[in-house]
């Protein structure tokens, strides 16, 4: 109970900590919601509050002086950052950028609370405490920011988190954000030393730090937006190339079919002559057998159209050939016609899924290999399932298995599928049923 009393005392004396913690959780819920279950957010919030006495003791031990309000807020912010980074370590650089942006906003909101303390206190009769002023301003500003984020910036924020930028880009962004955050923390700690709060010196110091924070935040957001636009342009170019390649594969398959038909037509006169000769010689059984063989031959030379959708058909045709070449049975259950949807994301997801299934099958003896693809549309969603046997070398890592490959550049297939599905409001699920690995994708 003593520890709980310490937690309650720190919260009651610093109401802004509640605003920072709850506002941060809501902000992460807004941008990162698909990645977490809802109950993890209140758990993380409770851990944040329970960490306050530990943070206070840690600061006193390291710096040998009682911690102040500013330092407590900094420690709380860094503690939340650490937990979020651990939870979203797959997107470390992008999450770090988001966290430092939120940290700079926290500082900005805090200082505006101090700056507006005097007019707020005067408006409310002069009995308003400084902590209550800060908490009130932060509640208002967080509410506005969350509404704007939810209504306007939510999808852009999620795309930023999911954008596969080069490592050096995220290192540069995170380094810039960390430097800006440390400078602002240093300036704010200096400003808080200018007591009392009614002194004009601290007001002007806080206004200066606010202006500096706004300038840094503007520059930082400009860098992030520029980087994101560059990444989107590059991704759009890659999608165009991929779409062109998918169309090219489909057209090549169609041309090959038509070439085979022309050859069959050229040979048809000879076949008809043979059948006519057999009938003239009264060899009816031989003529029937010849016609049957001719039909089987024509069917074997005609490539099958698996779907009315050219993109889906191109992917399935390509992998049907690959599975046949590698002695891997490939079962198909396609209940889908031509689709009006995001073909690039569909092709990328299915290509990665079938590529993973092929690689897993090649690790097994030929008699144990089996891959099945099921496709259907339901309620305007495109659904497909890939089932394949595997050799038990799968490491489950959160929602998707991790890669067992040690060379750089591998292990991104399932993550790419997940990101493509989530970018369109879909999802993926992975499960193991005995020696079968089952991947379900909804787009």
Image (cartoon, rainbow, N blue to C red):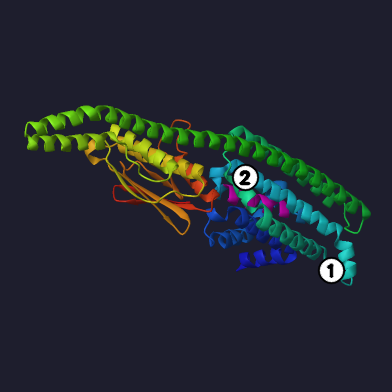
Q: Which mark is residue 128?
A: 1
**Residue depicted at x 34% and y 33%:** 257
Left or right, 156 with respect to 254, comes to right
**298 lies above or below 218:** above
| Whether residue 165 is visible | no
Left or right, 144 with respect to 384, comes to right
Q: CA distance from mark 2 to mark 1?
A: 40 Å
Q: Residues within 10 Å of mark 1 (few under 14, many from 20)?
A: some
**Residue depicted at x 19% and y 30%:** 271
Left or right, 39 with respect to 400, comes to right
What is the span of residues highlighted in magenta in the rendered image? 73-85
Residue 77: say if magenta: yes
Find residue 236 and report its image quarter. Answer: top right
- For this orientation, the residue located farthest to the right is 200
**Residue depicted at x 66% and y 35%:** 172
* x and y, in percent, of residue 39 in the image: 53, 62
- For this orientation, the residue located farthest to the front is 280
Task: Tell me the element at label 2.
Answer: helix
**215 lies above or below 128:** above
360, 248: nearer the viewer: 248
* x and y, in percent, of residue 312 in the image: 42, 43
- Quadrant the N terminus occupies: bottom right
- For this orientation, the residue located farthest to the bottom is 125
172, 85: nearer the viewer: 172
Mark 2 — residue?
Answer: 160
**Residue depicted at x 56% and y 39%:** 164
């Amino acid at each position: 109970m003593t520890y709980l009393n310490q937690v309650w005392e720190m919260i009651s004396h610093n109401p802004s900590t509640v605003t920072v913690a709850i506002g941060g959780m809501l902000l992460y819920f807004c941008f990162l919601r698909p990645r977490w279950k809802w109950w993890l957010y209140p758990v993380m919030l409770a851990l944040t509050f329970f960490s306050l006495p530990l943070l206070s003791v840690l600061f006193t031990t390291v710096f040998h002086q009682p911690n102040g309000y500013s330092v407590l807020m900094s420690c709380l912010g860094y503690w939340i950052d650490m937990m979020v980074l651990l939870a979203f370590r797959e997107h470390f650089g992008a999450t770090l950028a988001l966290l430092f942006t939120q940290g700079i906003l926290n500082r900005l909101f805090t200082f505006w609370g101090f700056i507006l303390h005097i007019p707020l206190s005067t408006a409310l009769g002069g009995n308003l405490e400084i902590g209550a002023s800060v908490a009130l301003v932060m509640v208002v500003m967080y509410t506005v920011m969350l509404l704007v984020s939810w209504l306007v910036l939510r999808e852009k924020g999620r795309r930023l988190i999911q954008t596969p930028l080069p490592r050096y880009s995220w290192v540069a962004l995170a380094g810039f954000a960390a430097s800006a955050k440390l400078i602002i923390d240093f300036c704010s700690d200096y400003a808080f030393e200018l007591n009392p709060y009614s002194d004009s010196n601290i007001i002007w110091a806080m206004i200066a730090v606010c202006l500096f924070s706004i300038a840094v935040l503007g520059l930082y957001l400009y860098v992030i937006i520029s980087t994101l636009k560059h990444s989107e342009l590059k991704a759009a170019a890659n999608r165009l190339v991929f779409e062109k390649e998918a169309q090219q594969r489909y057209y090549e398959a169609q041309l090959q079919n038509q070439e085979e038909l022309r050859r069959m037509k050229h040979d048809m006169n000879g076949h008809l002559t043979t059948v006519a000769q057999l009938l003239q010689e009264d060899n009816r059984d031989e003529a029937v057998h010849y016609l049957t063989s001719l039909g089987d031959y024509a069917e074997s030379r005609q490539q099958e159209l698996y779907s009315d959708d050219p993109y889906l058909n191109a992917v399935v045709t390509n992998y049907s050939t690959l599975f046949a070449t590698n002695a891997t049975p490939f079962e198909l259950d396609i209940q889908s016609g031509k689709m009006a949807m995001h073909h690039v994301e569909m092709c990328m997801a299915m290509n990665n899924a079938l590529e993973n299934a092929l690689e897993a099958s090649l690790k097994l003896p030929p008699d144990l290999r089996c891959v099945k693809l099921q496709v259907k549309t339901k309620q305007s969603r495109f659904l497909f399932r890939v089932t394949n046997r595997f050799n038990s070398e799968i490491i489950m890592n959160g929602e998707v298995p991790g890669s067992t490959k040690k060379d750089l550049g591998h292990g991104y297939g399932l993550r790419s599928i997940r990101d493509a599905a989530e970018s369109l409001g879909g999802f993926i699920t992975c499960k193991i049923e005995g020696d079968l690995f089952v991947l379900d994708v909804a787009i």
